[in-house]
Amino acid sequence: MATKLPIAVAEGGLDSRAAVAFSQALQRPGVSRHVTVHGVQLHYLGWNLEANDKPVVLLVHGFRGHAHWWDGIAPYLAEDYRVIALDLSGMGDSDHRGSYPFQYAAADITGLIEAMELGPVTAIGHSYGGVRLLKACADHPQLFKRLINLDSYIYFPEETPPNDPGKSVRRYYPDLATAMGRYRLVPEQPRFEPAVLEHIARHSLREESEGWCWKFDPLIPAGINHEIPARELLPRVRRPVHVVYAEGSAVISASHARETVALLPFGKGPVVMPDAYHHMMIDQPQELTALLKSLLADGDTT
């Protein structure tokens, strides 16, 4: 059975306490840095980087996302941890690649951990990022202490996969306001906090000579042809994995989450966030922060 956590979120947006917490988090921005991994410059944000005595928490964003998705969460985790949120290659402020090898993002993750001599780390991945963490841990378990996966779809061939964002092309917009007005969540969800969404949208764009465009590379491969089947991947993950899913997710069902836990040698949960949607850091950042702190503290004592 999934564990259900109590929440209190105003319909249509964050309550006042959560809005204040998000505003306060933005007053403690991550330090922007780069590291070269296999000839590719990867960008990351760091909080509490100087605290070498504290354990590392690595944050990995979803498909076509970026490290700033964690800006409302990471400063609070940094009260007890050294926190790093990376941009996978082809996304955020990391380099685009000439080509994207199969499961390239897992190599980004392990390459960054090795280059920065961080391991073993606790890693938290959302959606696409969570699946890449599973692959990274399966290949290099010595680099990981444990994982927390947030609403990550694992490929079961007998299931109908969620809607794929499909191929994209480079689009340019005449000004920032027009570009931000075109920002959409994939999948869409009925509830979000406008300030959080606006912040993420702004960091999804950059200005080039032709105008404003999305930071992600349109050539990033997508679709189930680029996924490893669950029964092949999950038994190879030899570290504890907490599986978390959103009750209102358009990506993960309760049965999917339970089967994922069952196939993991050290699977935990699943834990369900009531009334949350797939992009849980946008509609429930305060509740997600509390959950992650609880799961991290639980792991530190076991």
Image (spheres, rainbow, N blue to C red):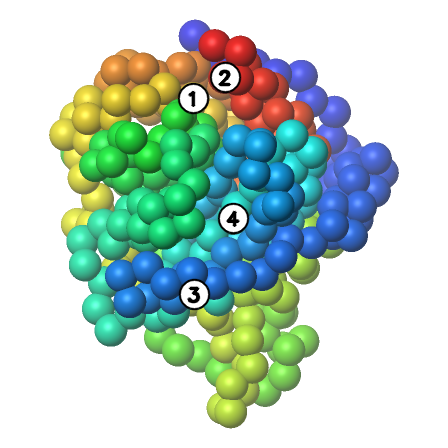
Residue at x 28% of width, y 67% of height: 39
Outermost residue toward the bottom in this view = 209
- Dividing the picture into quadrants, the one containing residue 95 is bottom left
Question: Tags 4 and 1 in contact by the CB under 8 Å rule?
Answer: no
**Secondary structure under badge 2?**
helix
Q: Looking at the image, which is closer to me, 110 or 64?
A: 110
Question: Tags 1 and 2 in contact by the CB under 8 Å rule?
Answer: yes
Q: Is residue 175 visible in the rendered structure shown here? A: yes
- Quadrant of image for the N terminus: top left
Residue at x 83% of width, y 42% of height: 20
Question: Tags 4 and 2 in contact by the CB under 8 Å rule?
Answer: no
Could you tell me the amino acid type at mark 2?
Gly
- CA distance for labels 1 and 2: 10 Å
Q: Position of residue 85 (x, y in %)?
A: 51, 48
Q: Position of residue 201 (x, y in %)?
A: 60, 62
Could you tell me the amino acid type at mark 3?
Ser
Q: Position of residue 206 (x, y in %)?
A: 55, 76
Residue carrying label 4: 85
Which circle marks residue 94 in the picture?
A: 3
Outermost residue toward the front in this view = 53
Q: Looking at the image, which is closer to me, 216 or 143?
A: 143
Q: Determine whether 177 is above or below 259 in the image.
A: below
Side of 202 relative to 65 (left or right): right
Q: Looking at the image, which is closer to me, 11 or 118?
A: 118
Q: Earlier in the sequence, mark 3 or mark 4?
A: 4
Which circle marks residue 242 in the picture?
A: 1
Q: Earlier in the sequence, mark 3 or mark 1?
A: 3
Q: Looking at the image, which is closer to me, 2 or 238?
A: 238
Q: Position of residue 277 (x, y in %)?
A: 55, 36
Which marked residue is nearer to the observer: mark 4 or mark 1?
A: 4
- CA distance for labels 2 and 3: 31 Å
Q: Earlier in the sequence, mark 1 or mark 2?
A: 1
